Image: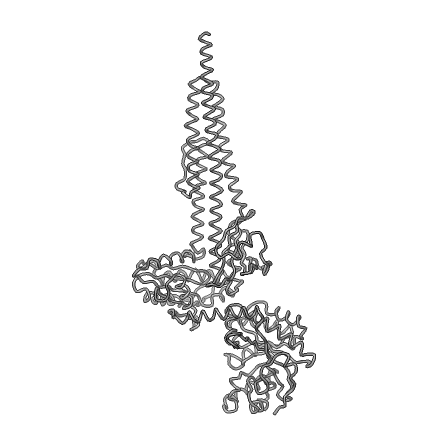
Amino acid sequence: MGLRGKFFVGLLLTGLVWSAVLVGTWLTARNAVDDVLTKNERSLRDTARAALDDRARQLAAFLRDALTNPLYYFDLLTMREVLRSALAQPDVQYVLVYDQRGRVIHDGSRDIMKFGQRMDDALAPGLIASEELRVQWGDGVLDASAPMLIGELRLGGVRVGMSTDRMDAAVAIDTEQAHVALRENFATPVRVLLLGLLALLANIGLVGWWIARGLVRPIRELSLRAEEIEQGQYGAAAASRRSDELGDLMRAFGRMSEGVRKHHADIHKLAYRDALTSLPNRLSFRERLEQAVASVGDRGLALLFIDLDDFKRINDTLGHDAGDQVLTEFAARCHRALGLDSGGSPITFARLGGDEFVALIEGPEAAPRAESAAKAVLQQLREPFDVVDKSLLVSASIGITVFPDDAHSPKLLLKHGDLAMYQAKQQGKNCYRFFAGHLTLLAEERLMLEHELRAALDNERLTVSYQPIYAMQSGALVGAEALLRWHHPQRGTIPPSMFVPVAEATGLIDALGDFALRSACRAAAAWQMHAPGRYVAVNVSGRQIQRPGLEKRVADALAESGLEPRLLHLELTESSLMHDEAQAFAVLTELRKAGARIWLDDFGTGFSGLSHVRRARVDGVKIDRSFIADILNDPEDRALASAIIAMATSLGMEVVGEGIESAAQYTLLRSLGCQMAQGYWMSKAVSAQELALLGAIEAP
């Protein structure tokens, strides 16, 4: 073989060797590409899933804390506002508040079409009875649920559904972009490989070196960077001076890493900051409180629990935008009052939600400093708030509790601050009160009474008795007043004065009122068979008047029982008209249009009885028993009763005297022109069946 052949053979063998080397290099690079694509896709998906899981957990925990009190008080309006803000978050597909039986209470919509429906989807069985925050992955959705409890009482829970569509689409796009970029990058090495097979041995070696250094190393770096991101180590964005596609890929990967880092920071801010006031939120404050309690040592620790008085009135009358403006200005004033810009001992000021704020004061003499801070906050509120071209005076009630004198845990410290704040509200509002031990007993007693009242309603342990009302001239039985009775198996008879305020405070008043109204209408309808025209009077509380839907509930009760509307008398006190007179008078007008008759109960004990009689256009008044009790001996009581009767008669209204306990009282009131009477002298309260058998009395 000549030199040419040997050279050719040698060149061929060398070419084959270098081809094998290049093929090996290409296979190594291809494996590296596949490795980085796989890890990149897994990293993107795991990061996105972790971020979505983190968002879902934090949102579920936030909603659990924000909705516990509204659920406890069955405040559907507050639930709706909170759920609407949650539904506005990206990726949120649904938000549900459910009771302990898994029935939907609110879904954030205006009409709550799912109200009362039991959750029956595939994920529901695993979360209804769960005692802790739970995350489940379903078909296209991440479901996070958190139970809501007050003490050991389970109220229900909140459920958040996060759609995975946007996450999957983003991962698919990023993965496809990585595939495209790498495929474009591989075009050049493939061409170089083909040229290298035809080039000289030197060029083949050069191409092999270029491939090893210019392609494999950056891909390995990207693979290592993907692993760091997968472990949550975001670090600085990857940089490259290359101007080719591989450089574009490295820079795109760096931008993606920076975007994930910022997204993580935004989630952290959303979880720990109040969106309206930029103050620390409930979650952030609880963590700070736990840290402070754990490290308090010999230093002092005091908590101010601040709640705006009658804030709901601002939202209802001026709108939620005005309410938000008041909250923002209030936060700024508290910031100044607490001296947060002046340094000194640390003070943490946060918004728990709604109109509730807290301030944590650390350092020596925490209790005196807390009292001074409370005074400073109240002083700031002396100046009016300028809201939507109106000047509003806003007050606040403040509860103060001290660690460890009042509590030994962060949870109890917040609870006792809340109790002290409610004590301030009960003592006139616009003031501060320190926590006292007896408040805990009162709160526990009230909670127990509420629990037992709910059970009594569910188990139909409440009854309605009827106090007969007689025409004074003839002695005929013309009607009866419906009176709620609760016979507790251990406590005996519990008077309405104890359980009605609890019902009003906890939202049970609607159920309680509906029970009394429907029972009374059914009883009066049955009386008509033996005593046509005998009416029934039902008491209506101020809370029922202010809450929407009273007109419909009355109409439904009348339609269900078949009772003529004129035989239903609705009794309300003067004080029930004073919170929002325009709303109250509008409701009374609709009730009168429906045919029901309106009476003022306990007349004469209010603040402006004549004004309310004129504006409300009532059909009758009931003289309060306090005027009748001593009417025989007290000339002033006799004069007042006579004046009330004369005024009502001149306006064409009827008058009922309450609490008549003797024949002499009966005779005197009849001589003064009083038309009707009720009291123990005529008859005590009886059952509906017993009242149907009663007839006229023999008038003295």
Q: Quadrant of the C terminus?
A: bottom right
Q: In x, y percent, where is residue 234?
A: 41, 42
Asked if residue 256 is positioned above or below residue 182 in the image, the reply reads below
Q: In x, y percent, where is residue 280?
A: 41, 56
Q: Nearer the viewer, residue 93 or 615?
A: 93
The residue under the point 43% across, 30% down is 216
Coloration mode: one colour
Count of numbered marks: 0
Q: Quadrant of residue 363?
A: bottom left
Asked if residue 15 is positioned above or below residue 307 in the image, the reply reads above
Q: Nearer the viewer, residue 102 or 286?
A: 102
Residue 322 seen in the figure: no
Residue 639 seen in the figure: yes
Q: Quadrant of residue 586?
A: bottom right
Left or right: residue 482 compared with residue 315: right
| Outermost right residue | 529
Q: In x, y percent, where is residue 208?
A: 43, 23
Asked if residue 458 is positioned above or below residue 10 in the image, the reply reads below
The residue under the point 46% across, 28% down is 28
| Outermost top residue | 2
Q: In x, y percent, where is residue 218?
A: 42, 32
Q: Nearer the viewer, residue 127 or 401?
A: 127
